[in-house]
Amino acid sequence: MADSVAEQDIIVIGAGIVGLATARHLLASRPGLRILVIEKELAPGTHQTGHNSGVIHAGIYYAPGSLKARLCKEGAEATRRFCAQNDIPFDSCGKLIVATDAAELPRLDALRERAEQNGLEFRMIGVAELAEIEPNVAGVGALLSPASGIVDYGQICRVLRDRLAEEGVTFQFGAKVTGLRETPDMVTVKTDQGDHSARCLVACAGLQADRIAAMSGLADDFRIIPFRGEYYRLAPDASDLVERLIYPVPDPSLPFLGVHLTKMIGGYTTVGPNAVLSLGRETYGGNRMVPEDARATFGFPGFWKLMARSVRPGLQELRGTLSRRTYLERCRRYCPALTLSDLQPHAPGIRAQAVGRDGRMIDDFLLRETRRTIHTCNAPSPAATSAFPIGAEIGGRVLDKLNT
């Protein structure tokens, strides 16, 4: 392969929903672009995209003015529009964020203020109305987000792949990226199935984002720390206990949203997730140690600083892993009808969380660039909901690079 000639205009690493949405925006903006998507798995959307809760978030939780807040609202609308155009089932079932005691009401009111600042539709629900619309949910008040919904993001990925392939995008599945080499005019991607060159590279590598970014010298100050989200699935006779998504009021001392009830497009309901450290980045079958992944976590100074600040919440999450009864107690605070036999096994997910050297979780989306590359270094929830506008944001930057 001659170094002076690029095979592609753009290479996208990662066939999760963000990578595919980026390719879609690029092709729509400039038809005829030569785009190659490289994915180490044999199908699209097999990691975070295919293992999340399937929620179309409205954007209530996110700081006003942040990328998360702006892109989530835009993304929810874009997701529903794409599903309608492509006959993908979705359900705008709504979400209730439930305060279970008076101590949580100030935090619920803070969420109301955020919803107002973010320009979102919502309604405050009192005790009597809560009992009327969700008789199996107990609380002293709630915030209703009618725009929240559910979808199968894995199906969105499969449809995106098919549409992109029809329009000329090339896919290479089963190819692991082993190195990057950048010159002023192009970038070469080395894989275990051969090398490819392009005028620009987009990396949307999720759980491997720091490793790919490190190949461009962009990952010195953060590390992907994997957190395992464990779920249960409600028994069939309990699957219709609720009509909406039921979330607790988030505890500000905890980094995630807490255990919630999630209706799924498949007609069942899940309970979860908790959030415990994962010893491997892709160990869905059990929390076994993968030496390379464990070294990356335990060898990073920011991990230990994070742990030092998170002893209490970490132990709380671990209790839920070790005891199904503890998990049940958390759920029964807002859904007292649940019993231990209602909690049946369900597949876990693993979240890629970027952590800085100071030990703080990087909360917002994080994009980093070189002359010829753009790396999505942190794309936590609501990245699936926000994928289409994230793809537009990345795609716009790529098109600028193609013009230089």
Image (spheres, rainbow, N blue to C red):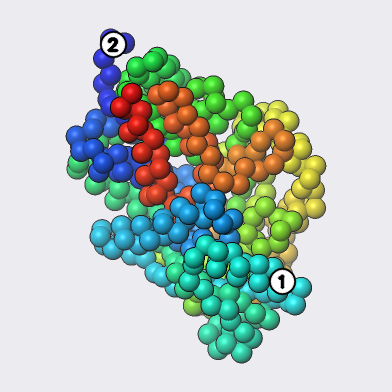
The kind of secondary structure element at disc 2 is loop
Choose top left, top right, bottom left or bottom right for residue 300. top right
**Mark in the foreground, 2 or 1:** 1
Q: Identity of the amino acid at label 2? A: Ser
Q: Is residue 276 above or below residue 115?
A: above
Q: CA distance from mark 2 to mark 1?
A: 62 Å
Q: Identity of the amino acid at label 1? A: Pro
Name the spot of residue 43 as percent of width and height, x first.
Answer: 36, 41
Residue at (71, 58) in percent of width and height: 252
Choose top left, top right, bottom left or bottom right for residue 35. top left
Residue at (26, 58) in percent of width and height: 86
Name the spot of residue 59 as percent of width and height, x first.
Answer: 51, 60
The kind of secondary structure element at disc 1 is helix
Name the spot of residue 26 as percent of width and height, x first.
Answer: 30, 39
For label 2, count other residues whose C-alpha is less than 10 Å away and answer few (under 14), some (14-19) or many (20+).
Answer: few
Q: Which residue is mark 2?
A: 4
Decide which of tag 2 and tag 1 comes sooner along the chain.
2
Q: Is residue 141 above or below residue 318?
A: below
Q: Which quadrant is the N terminus positioned in?
A: top left
Choose top left, top right, bottom left or bottom right for residue 39. top left
Q: Which residue is mark 1?
A: 106
Does the residue at mark 2 contact the one at mark 1 (Cβ under 8 Å)?
Answer: no
